[in-house]
Amino acid sequence: MAKRAKKKPAKAPAKKQSKRAKPKAKPESDGGWRIFAPFRRARKWIVRGALGVLALILAVVFLFGFVAPPTTPYIVSEARRLGGIDRSWIAFEDVASVMPRSVVAAEDANFCSHWGFDMEAIREALEAGGQRGASTISQQVVKNVFLWQGRSWPRKAMEASLTPLVEALWSKQRILEVYLNVAEFDEGVFGVEAAAHHYFKTHPSKLTARQASLLAAVLPNPKGRSASNPSSWLSRRANSIADGAATIRADGRAECFEG
């Protein structure tokens, strides 16, 4: 009988080897990137610092919408130079209504209709070659309360940034109230309460139209003008301011702060 050929056992199928991603070769040196690490950290802290400053400014502006500013950079400077100043805070409702009207008529007749900047006054100032001022009462409050005196582009830029914020967070009456309490009326005399006693020996609630217009007339140059001893020019200027105060009351331009 023929011998049967023996069957060879079947080979088990070969297992497929899983393909693993080969790790990428690391660069020999990352020293180039390390050079920029301090700059990245510095940028992060600068951004955080800037955000912190903005938050602080926002908080202070909001706070002063309800709380009387204790002082201002200029008042501090004058107090050091003179050895003291005369100033007492007084509420808006305790001031004769003719006083804020006189200030608006003298400094910013369109106070109730603008949002911090009087574009018409700015155009007129530019046409006059910059010989006349165009700052609104809102801008003056920002400069007096938060910034420093003097003409410089950095101060102007900060003033332009803060003025809309003050207009947004404060009422028009509040802006006027702060202005009347921080404005300089004579050397070392700040605020309408001190000015009324200094010039006329009276309380701000008892100011007459003539006295209010004289006080408003000295505001552009408080160290060079006197409300109690006005020059003929200043007296005429006060008459014009008194007429303007009556006009803005009649035509409704005082409604935003008299309510």
Image: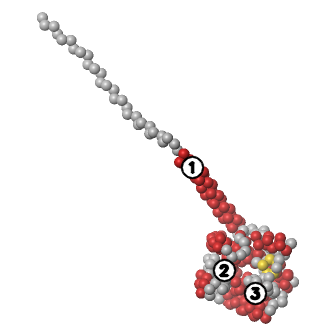
Assign the N terminus to one quadrant of the image. Answer: top left
Three-letter code for the amino acid on which mark 1 is drawn: Ile
For residue 104, what is the image quadrant?
A: bottom right
Q: Is residue 41 above or below residue 133?
A: above
Three-letter code for the amino acid on which mark 3 is drawn: Ala
Q: Nearer the viewer, mark 1 or mark 2?
A: 1
Three-letter code for the amino acid on which mark 2 is drawn: Ser
Assign the C terminus to one quadrant of the image. Answer: bottom right
Where is mark 2, residue-wise? 135
**Number of marks:** 3
Where is mark 3, residue-wise? 217
Q: In x, y percent, where is residue 147? A: 71, 71
The residue depicted at 86 percent of the width and 72 percent of the height is: 83
Q: In x, y percent, where is residue 40? A: 58, 52
For residue 8, what is the image quadrant?
A: top left
Mark 3–mark 1 CB contact (< 8 Å): no
Disc number placed over residue 35 in the picture, else none: 1
Mark 2–mark 3 CB contact (< 8 Å): no
Q: Distance from label 1 to label 2 (Cα)?
A: 48 Å
Circle 1 residues within 10 Å: few <14, some 14–19, many ≥20:
few
Q: In x, y percent, where is residue 189? A: 82, 78
The residue depicted at 80 percent of the width and 82 percent of the height is: 223
Circle 3 residues within 10 Å: few <14, some 14–19, many ≥20:
many
Q: Is residue 93 above or below residue 211?
A: above
Residue nearer the viewer, 97 or 145: 145
